[in-house]
Image (tube, helix red, strand yellow):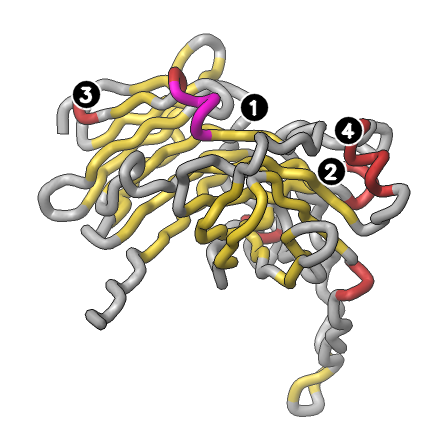
Amino acid sequence: MNSKSFLPLSVLAPLLLFPCRTTAQDPAGASVQARLDFVAWGEDLRGVQAGTATKHQPVSALAFRYSEPLKYDGPQVISIYWKPSAAPVVEEPTSFNGIPIPPAAPAAPATTPNDATTEEKIPEELAKRREKEPDLAAIVPLIAGASQMTILLAPGPQNTFHCYVIDDEPTRFPWGSIRLHNYAAAPIGLRLNSAKMVALKYRESIIAPASADGSTIYQLAYQKDGKWKPQENNIIHVNPDEQVHFIVLQSDASFFRSSDGSRGGKLQTVTLRRQKPAAAPPK
């Protein structure tokens, strides 16, 4: 693959990547029909619902991986609710075959793209609506014309979410392609299949088709003392019926920790794979 195979998205970012909005004003009559995949940035989230103020339904949001999508048909602005107390309590076993099991180490707090703290203020419109809807966690504008979207839910202040909506419309992100994202708070370098290294700033991304055999060799690097420092070389396999997200980030979430609690590397990586839906049978 040569460097011309890359499609830089930084110029198109306003069309492809949205944070949570601070106002709930909808375009007149705008509505969306799409498949929405919710992904938790940190730990698995339970008790999340999405929809409108009068009708919302449970959604699955697992840590850095896809699960069950939501088939959504409604206003372009979607409301996300979170009631942590709704999560089921699971009793951890204290022994196995009569041998005591030591208690698990507490999960490390997950970092967020915006380094949210308890002192951070939530958006004014969200705060106003929470006076009547205390479980409202985010107000999110969806992407008009997109039949598929990925919504990253990162922890925010006071049980709210920072949300990042990624446009996965197949006409703009073809099946058999890989999209590489930088969600680390510093530039990263990516080299694909021996092509020229591409530098990505925070929240920039590129789309690249897989090579003929379905594999993509990547080299990941970060800057140190003004130079690129390699972190890893690996291969990502992309099938013709897949959309693959390769996300580079920095996180202390337990998802990235080994059994002894250690975390390897300055950067962490996540691979999300969406399978192409089966064609509807002929009528």
Q: Earlier in the sequence, mark 2 or mark 4?
A: 4
Measure the C-alpha gap from mark 4 to mark 3: 41 Å
Residue 58 spot, x, y in % from top left: 64, 63
Measure the C-alpha gap from mark 3 to mark 2: 37 Å
Measure the C-alpha gap from mark 3 to mark 1: 25 Å
Magenta residues span 12-16
Identified by mark 3, the residue type is Ser
The reply to whether discs 1 and 4 touch (Cβ–Cβ < 8 Å) is no
Of the 4 image quadrants, the one containing the C terminus is bottom left
Magenta highlight: main SS: helix
Q: Earlier in the sequence, mark 2 or mark 1?
A: 2
Pointer 3 local density, CA inside 10 Å: few below 14, some 14–19, many at least 20:
some
Q: Secondary structure at mark 2?
A: loop
Q: Tag on residue 3?
A: 3
Q: Quadrant of residue 126?
A: top right
Q: Which residue is mark 4?
A: 123
Pointer 1 local density, CA inside 10 Å: few below 14, some 14–19, many at least 20:
some
Residue 209 spot, x, y in % from top left: 20, 37
Identified by mark 1, the residue type is Ala
Picture residue at 47% right of the left edge, 22% below the top? 14
Of the 4 image quadrants, the one containing the N terminus is top left
From the image, state whether disc 4 or disc 3 is nearer to you: 4
Q: Earlier in the sequence, mark 3 or mark 2?
A: 3
Q: Secondary structure at mark 1?
A: loop
Identified by mark 4, the residue type is Pro
Q: Which residue is mark 1?
A: 185
**Can the viewer see residue 159 in this picture?**
yes
Q: In the shown orientation, is residue 145 left or right of residue 131?
A: left
Residue 216 spot, x, y in % from top left: 22, 40
Q: Which residue is mark 2?
A: 156
Q: Nearer the viewer, residue 42 or 141?
A: 141
